[in-house]
Structures are given as C-alpha cells and as structure tokens.
Image: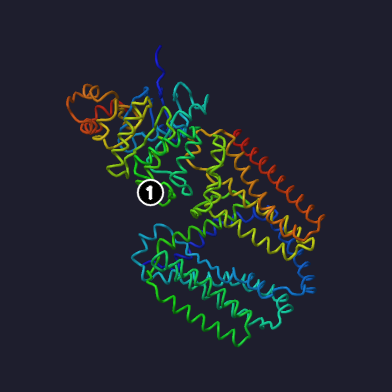
Amino acid sequence: MINLPELRQKRRGEFWAQILPYTQYIIQSGVAVLTFFLLIAFAAWYTTFVQNIPAGLPVYWIMLVLLTPLTVYGSVRTYMRPADVVFMLPVETQMNTYFASAWRGGMIGKSFWLILLAIVAWPFYVRAAIEPKPLLVLLLCILLLKGVSNYGSWQEMRMEGQRARVGYRVLRYIAIIGLLGAVLWLPLAMAIITLVAGIVIYVICLRLPGKVAVPWERLIAAEKNHAASVMRMLGWFVDVPTGERKVNHRRWLSFIGKRLPWKQEQAFRFLLTRTFIRTELLPTLSRFVVFGIILIVLARESWFGIAVYLLFIILAGMQLTMLRKQHTDTLWLSIYPLPPAARRLETIRLITIVQLVVAIVLWIPIAITGNIAWLIGALIAGLLIVWIQRASLNRKWLRELQLEEEFE
Amino acid sequence: MEQVPVLQVDRLTGGYSLGKPVLHDISFQVGKGEMIGLIGLNGAGKSTTMKHILGLMTPQGGEVHIQGATLRKAPEQYRSSLAFVPEAPQLYEEMTVREHLEFTARAYGVEPADYERRAARLIDLFNMKEKEDSLSMHLSKGMKQKVMIMCAFVAAPPLYIIDEPFLGLDPLGIRSLLDFMVETKQGGSSILLSSHILSTIENYCDRFIVLHRGRIIVQGTLEQIREQTGQQGTPLEQIFYDLVQDSTWTVSND
C-alpha cells in the first residue's frame, strides 16, 4: 500500500534538494546585496512618502491593485509526474490524502507574502483612507478571499470542458476582485455581509459544472509549469536546465518576426522570436514591466524612482538572458546549415531590441513629469545600461565558446 | 571522369565509448539518384551509422564524405548537402507546421519563391492544409512525423537521411511518402533509408545494406543479395530473417 502523504513529502524533498545547491550562486551574483540596498532605499522613500502622502491619491484603488495579485493567484505544488497517470490511477480514490499537504502548502506559503504586503501597505492605507478597516479585520478578509480563490482554482482544474474552466476562472477573478473591492470601499458591517453572501453564491456556482475526481493530465501539466517557473527564475542567475515550457499560440502576435530578412544568418532569430512570443518569457516580462510602471509612477518625483527605473531595466535584461538558454540541446541546430556565429549574434540582437523597448516603455512615466533634465538623464542612463549588458553578455558568451574550443 | 558519390562512408568505426565501438569498419556509398535501404535488427547500428553521417558523433576511425566534403573541412557545404528525418519526431512546440517549414527553408537558404511552391505542394500532398497553422504540440504523432518529412523535403538537398519514416504514418501518408521519395530520386537526389518494413521498401530501394552487430554482412541490389545468399526468388524479409539467424553469416563476420 503506497503511503501517499509520505510520497509527496519525498518528492518535495527531492525537488528542493536539486534547487538548493543553486542558491549560493544567487547570493554570489550580488542579488542579496542589491536586494538589501534596495530595501533600505525603499524604507527611506516609503517613510518620507507616508509622512507626506499627496492629497487626492486613490488609496482604495492602489490597495486593490496591490492586494489583488497575491489574493487571486494561488499555485498548488503537487510534484506529480507523467507516469502517475498510469501507476497511481488505482489509488485515485485516496488521492485526497496526497493532495492535502499540497493544499495546506499552497495556502500557508503564499499567505505569508500576502500578510507581509498588507502589513507594509498598512501605514499608507491607515493614513490615506477615510474610514480604514482595522488591520486584523482586513487581514482576515483577504486571507478568507485567498482561501476561496485557492479552492475555486482547484475546482476549476477538476472541471470537464475547456469552456467551463475558462468561464469559471473569469468568474473567480471577478468575484475575488469584486469582493476585495467591497472590503475596501464599503462600511465594515456592509462589507462583511457582502463578503459572506458573495462567497456563498460563488461556492454554490462552483458546484454546478461536472467534474472529474482527479484531473491527472492537467495536474501533471500544471506541475511541469510550476517546476519550470522555478527553474526559470533560477536561470536569471545561474545556468540550469530549462525543463518543460508552457507554450501559448498568441495568434495576435504571430506577425512579429514574419518580416525578418530572408537570410540564413537570421533564420535563428525567426525561431527565437517565436520562442519569445509564445513561451512564458513574454507574459513574465510584461507583468514585470507593468509592476515596474506602477512603482515608477509612485516614485518618479524622487531619486528612488530613477533607481527603480534603472533596476527594472537591469532585471529585464537578466530575464531576457533566458533566451540564450533556449534551444541549447535541439537536434536541428546541430544539423541545419546555420552560420556558426548566428546563434550568438541573433540572440544578443533580439535581447537588445526587447530590452530597448522595455527601457522606453518604463521611461514614459518619467517623461510625463516634464522635468527635462530628469527625463533626458534617465533615458541616457537607461540606454547605457542596455549597451553595457549587451557588451557584457557578448563578452561572456565569447569567453565560454573559447573555453569550449580549448576543452575540445 | 568518375562521378563523386553523394555519400561515401569509408571504413567507419565508431560508437559511444572508445574501447567499445558499435560500428566496425563500415564502408558503402550512395550514388546520385539512388535510394539505399539500410536494414538491421534493433541495436544493429543503423541509427549510430546515421548519427556519424549527420556529424552528431565523431568517428573513431574512417571517414564520411558528402559530395566529396568532410564535416571537419567544409562544415557549411556538408550541412547544406543533407536533410534528416529522425525516427522520433523532434519539433519546436512553439512553432506551427508552416513556421517549421519556413524556418527550415530559411536555414537552408531556400529562395522564398521556391519555399512557397514546395511548401504548398507538400502540405497538399500530406493532407496538412487544415493543420498548417496549428502548433506542433497539438499534432498527433503521425502528423508530427509528416512535418519532419515535409521539413526535409522543403530543403531539397542532394542527400536525405531518413530513419524509420513510416512509424505512426497512416496508409495514405505512407503512400504519399513513397511516391514523393521516388519523385525525389528521379529528380537526382539520393536517399539513405532505414526501415523495418522490408516488404514495403523491397520494391522501392535500388540497393540494400544489411547491418548486423555493427558490421555490414551483405550489400547490393536485391538480385545480388539473392545470389550471394543462394535464395533466388525469395522476398527480402525472408532473406533478412535467414541472414540474421544463420550463424555462418553472423559469426564469420564477428
């Protein structure tokens, strides 16, 4: 008889055992020091900001934007493997014991960050809001909503039919964001009544569509994506196997790269452009840029805003270096007659183009301030960073190629 | 003047570790417009031979020439001269069927007009019109195999290395492939084909190479092989079965 909770525990241990050795490289890469300084800079800026909150700031909207992602988004790590659909099918009826710790982990782990965020935002909220809710009430409400969102997300996975899953996902987003809004905007008693009534209606709605007991294939695919996203994040700092990738057609972006010159040396960029627009790289970068814009808008009047602007360009560049790790082991690049330097040159070219676009998009909130010296200085510094990162990547790549040649 | 063979394999010895070669002293050649069947049991060395020709493995001894060039001396000419269809489809899951063809055409330097013409023909021939804008990850195994085959043919090089192409193909797909291979051969290109479906390739290949335990135990046209084995009028499948069972053929060559 398989001990299912123990099996998940063992798999969890194995997964993190392969991740842990890489953490030292992350620390060595200077991220720890950078994060530390950034925290100090943020603390200094935030203290000043809270003491002099500009009049008319849309506090409830800002709180809604801050709290929504961590409340709505919930991932459950099951550590399931493709072979499970064959070997664990006989114990399908007992799989809840396997998933129990995954559900707990999904709630507890993510709630920590949500609570931290709420506590950090609290001084701003309590000063800026007309009728702020007590901290404990606010925390209880958002944790309750997070629990409901996690439950809804799991039920969506169990639903039969793509249409039902998409529909219920949209319903969950609307319900959670709407109820979070109710908690922020409505008077306390009304907010609680709305919250409870909303949750009851939502949970009843969840009971309507047909569901499978264990959505094996979807769980395995979701687990692959989770594992890949951990590897992707590690990949910003150190060479790790890229693993499984989540791919989305995004037909509306298919025009990108179609007009590339029809030359052998640019064939690789054609492939890499497809990889960029259809894998998780583009949405991850887009979310990151949106987050950057929000921070820059809040802090653009101070030096902290410029620091955030430059930091986000650097981090975007680091994310984009993931493109370098794509297609490292593909058969066709060993067989097709591509010019030897094409891979390096075309990858660097694409990274630079995208990083330039990011630098300009992030610069727009600074440009709108109208302070000429400020906006020109920021743009020059931003472009300089793109150029430095490009040169550094090229140098590093050439050095590695040289080492490989010497080794051979 | 003697014509240079499209593929020339000279005394090729190779494998995955130095002390234990998988291939022993293999020599054969493929002429212009020839279709050669490379046959053998699982583990006989067919895929290893192909990997050496593709340059994915370095020979421990001997040489491989494609149109007179070696991979070491003229890598771009060598690579441009061959296309490969692997046994298991290997596609980029983020690209559509059409984009795979376009990427291949771009990589081989095929002119855009030629690409458009060839791609339209292949898509029609392999019944892939409805799927041309689908991501490869959404295709069935047989369709993925068709994409692999189409990619090789859109490049139109002088030499095709085709490993077990019929796996997963439906009967119509097999027929289309065989017809297209004959057409390609008649157009002057050469094909080295590995397959276990001996009854099918018997009627299509010009010559056969029988590999057993990393050695060529017999090669030639079907008639020559029948003469060498003394089995006049016997189908290829039966000759092959007798060859690999018969200890005199296998032991004397070990």
Q: Secondary structure at mark 1?
A: helix
Residue B199 screen position, x and y as percent: 23, 35
Screen quadrant of the C terminus of chain A: top right
Pinpoint the chain carrying mark 1.
B
Quadrant containing the N terminus of chain A is bottom left
Q: Is residue A300 above or below residue B195?
A: below
Residue nearest the viewer, comparing B240 with A219: A219
x then y, percent, for residue A289: 65, 58
Residue B149: where, in percent of width, then height?
Answer: 38, 38
Q: Is the residue A181 above or below the residue A380 in the image?
A: below
Which residue reaches farthest right? A373
Q: Which residue is denoted by mark 1 in the rendering?
A: B130
Residue B100 position in % (x across, y down):
46, 42
Judge left or right: residue B118 versus residue A25: left
Front residue of A82/A207: it is A207
Residue A283 in view of the camera: yes
- Label 1 amino acid? Glu
Q: Viewer-proximal residue, A376 or A342? A: A376
Q: Residue at x 34, y 44 (%)?
A: B127
